[in-house]
């Protein structure tokens, strides 16, 4: 599962290594990547986390996948956790890169600014601003540019639909933090992921089936910034879950 504004193309540094060990299925979330072609009628409904989660379940049903390991980045981790809550029998394990499980004060201010300006200024300006706040360092530049490049493929209307999801994100994340789930979970977080790492440290300590790996000299998008480390840790973890 990719993050908001991204697409399945963000996994280009993982595909070759992962295919050595697993059957790999990459998804484009609705309105992202290639998902929008020929499906606009389907996308006219209101977006909620449950609606988007059900999209994912429809895909794995179509592929006749009864149970699988899920790997996600950023917003993708929220969808995976929601899927695990709604369909726990479909989830073998979860790998959560750059996981979002709490919005700190800075994050909440960003969301409020977005709500105010989302219909006034071009969405890509907002997206670039958010990307810089989340990934500010020089070594985050590749990840930042990758997500901005993919986000340019969205439409203003599509961006607004996704942004409206922020209205339900705080209560959902609050529930996820409080509810330990009996599914093996690996969090892979950059040590420079200042907005989201502190809450994940707490979750990894309090949730029984959770492990945390912190990646040095790395920001939010760990699979792009430190692909070799990410691949090694994730592959070893998933093989261990077989």
Image (cartoon, grey):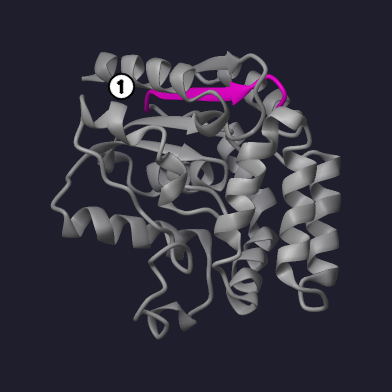
Instruction: Please state if 33 lies on the left or on the right of 177 as rendered.
Output: left
Q: How many labels does the image show?
A: 1
Q: What element carries label 1?
A: helix
Q: Residue 55: percent from the left, percent from the top? A: 36, 62
Q: Judge whether 134 appears above or below 183 on screen.
A: below
Q: Judge whether 166 appears above or below 92 on screen.
A: below
Is residue 174 visible to the viewer in this orientation of the structure?
no
Instruction: Please state if 169 lies on the left or on the right of 76 as rendered.
Output: right
Which residue lies at the image location 79% right of the left edge and 67% below the top edge?
115
Which residue lies at the image location 16% right of the left edge and 54% below the top edge?
63
Nearest to the observer: residue 225 or residue 188 = 225
Q: Residue 158: percent from the left, percent from the top? A: 58, 74
Q: Judge whether 63 appears above or below 187 on screen.
A: below
Toward which corner of the image does residue 157 lie, by quadrant? bottom right
Which residue lies at the image location 60% right of the left edge and 72% below the top edge?
161
Is residue 143 visible to the viewer in this orientation of the structure?
yes
**Which segment is the magenta one?**
183-193
Q: Residue 227: percent from the left, percent from the top? A: 47, 25
Which residue lies at the image location 20% right of the left edge and 56% below the top edge?
61
Q: Residues within 10 Å of mark 1 (few under 14, many from 20)?
A: many
Please say whether residue 136 is one of the residues in the magenta stretch: no
Q: Residue 28: percent from the left, percent from the top? A: 40, 58
Q: Judge whether 181 appears above or below 237 on screen.
A: below
Q: Name the residue under label 1.
A: 238
Q: Going by the picture, which residue comes out furthest to the bottom? A: 41
Instruction: Please state if 47 lies on the left or on the right of 217 as rendered.
Output: left
Nearest to the observer: residue 232 or residue 103 = 232
């Amino acid at each position: 599962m990719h993050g908001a504004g991204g697409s399945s193309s963000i996994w280009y540094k993982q595909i070759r290594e992962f295919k050595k060990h697993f059957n790999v299925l990459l998804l484009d979330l609705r309105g992202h990547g290639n998902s929008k072609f020929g499906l606009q009628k389907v996308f006219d409904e209101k977006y909620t986390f449950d609606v988007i989660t059900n999209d994912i379940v429809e895909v794995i049903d179509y592929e006749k996948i009864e149970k699988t390991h899920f790997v996600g980045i950023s917003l993708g981790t929220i969808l995976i956790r929601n899927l695990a809550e709604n369909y726990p029998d479909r989830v073998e394990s979860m790998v959560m890169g750059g996981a979002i499980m709490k919005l700190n004060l800075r994050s909440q201010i960003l969301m409020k600014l977005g709500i105010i300006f989302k219909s006034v200024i071009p969405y890509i300006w907002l997206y670039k601003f958010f990307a810089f706040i989340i990934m500010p360092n020089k070594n985050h530049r590749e990840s930042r540019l990758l997500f901005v490049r993919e986000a340019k493929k969205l439409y203003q209307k599509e961006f607004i639909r996704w942004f409206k999801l922020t209205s339900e994100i705080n209560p959902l994340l609050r529930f996820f933090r409080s509810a330990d789930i009996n599914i093996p979970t690996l969090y892979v977080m950059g040590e420079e992921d200042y907005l989201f790492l502190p809450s994940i440290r707490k979750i990894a300590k309090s949730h029984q089936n959770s492990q945390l790996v912190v990646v040095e000299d790395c920001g939010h998008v760990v699979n792009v910034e430190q692909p070799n480390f990410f691949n090694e840790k994730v592959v070893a973890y998933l093989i261990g879950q077989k």
